[in-house]
Image (spheres, helix red, strand yellow):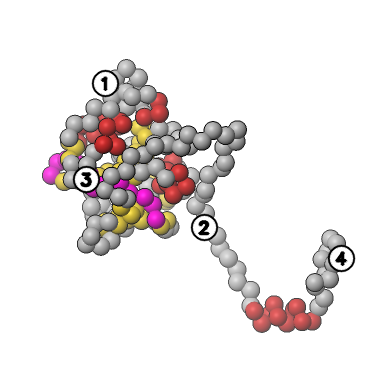
Amino acid sequence: MLLEKPNDIFQISIGDTVSKRNLFDLIQYSKVEGSPFWAGAEFAIGNTPQQGINWIGAAPQIQGVIIKTRPGSYKHDGWVADGRDTYRYSFKARNSLISYAELANRVLILQPQYSYPILLFTEAKGAWLFQGQFSVTEIDEMHVTLQRRGTYFKHEPETEESEFVEGGRRYVTHLIAERSRAAVSLLKSSTLSVCDICRKTF
């Protein structure tokens, strides 16, 4: 299939192949006004230098995410089961360090909140094979788990008008110190529970 404009990618069918040159040019030149691939700023495709994770549009108005992956390239990447409905995809890392604030990783982390489609392509015989549209269902420390959407999904960005834009979700890791239940029970039974501010006894 030949992709002429970035919005053509939402019409592609599962099993279609796109030449590596065509997808490369679409990603590179979609952001160059006046190029044959230009369809407006809302369809400009941002990308990592290796073009593995690509996002269509600018945050927070992402239209979709294009993932190009070579099975077996990373430890966590690949199909989870034979049905090919679940795929694990590794976060982008620099020198083995993952930054969840990096835009390439943020577009994966924010997908459950904004519901834009993730368009998954795998390498196949010198081309990119379209595997379908996916959503993030799990976020792990090293990767996300993608679950196949229905066989066809046309993405319509939210048009709700508002005076305020809510902040997005962030993926954070916390270290929790669990208290000993015996110590807590002993302390509660031996002292009064009084609020330091209002002096109310609990």
Q: Amino acid at mark 3?
A: Ile
**Badge 2 or badge 1: first in the primary sequence:** 1
| Residue of label 2 | 173
Which mark identifies residue 199?
4
Mark 4 vs mark 2: which is more N-terminal?
A: 2
Cα distance, mark 4 to mark 2? 35 Å
Magenta residue span: 125-137
User: Do the CB atoms of the residues marked 1 and 4 lie less than 8 Å apart?
Assistant: no
Tell me the kind of residue under disc 4: Arg
Quarter of the image for the C terminus: give it. bottom right
Q: Which element carries disc 4, helix, strand or loop?
A: loop
Within the image, what quadrant is residue 63 found in?
top left
Q: Which residue is mark 3?
A: 14
Q: Few, some or many C-alpha atoms within 10 Å of disc 1 (few <14, some 14-19, many ≥20)?
A: few
Q: Nearer the viewer, mark 3 or mark 2?
A: 3
Q: Are the two marked residues, 3 and 4, in contact with CB atoms closer than 8 angstroms? A: no
Marks 1 and 4, the one that precedes in the sequence: 1
The residues tagged by marks 3 and 1 sit, at their Cα atoms, a distance apart of 25 Å
Mark 1 lies on residue: 36
Where residue 192 sits in the image (x, y, percent)? 82, 76
- Labels 3 and 4: the sequence-earlier one: 3
Measured in 3D between alpha carbons, the distance from the residue under mark 3 to the one under mark 2, in whole angstroms, is 35 Å
Point out the frontmost of discs 4 and 2: 4
Q: Which amino acid type is shown beneath numbered disc 2? A: Thr
Local crowd at mark 3 within 10 Å, few (<14), some, or many (≥20)? some
Quadrant containing the N terminus in the rendered view: top left
Residue 72 left/right relative to 46? left
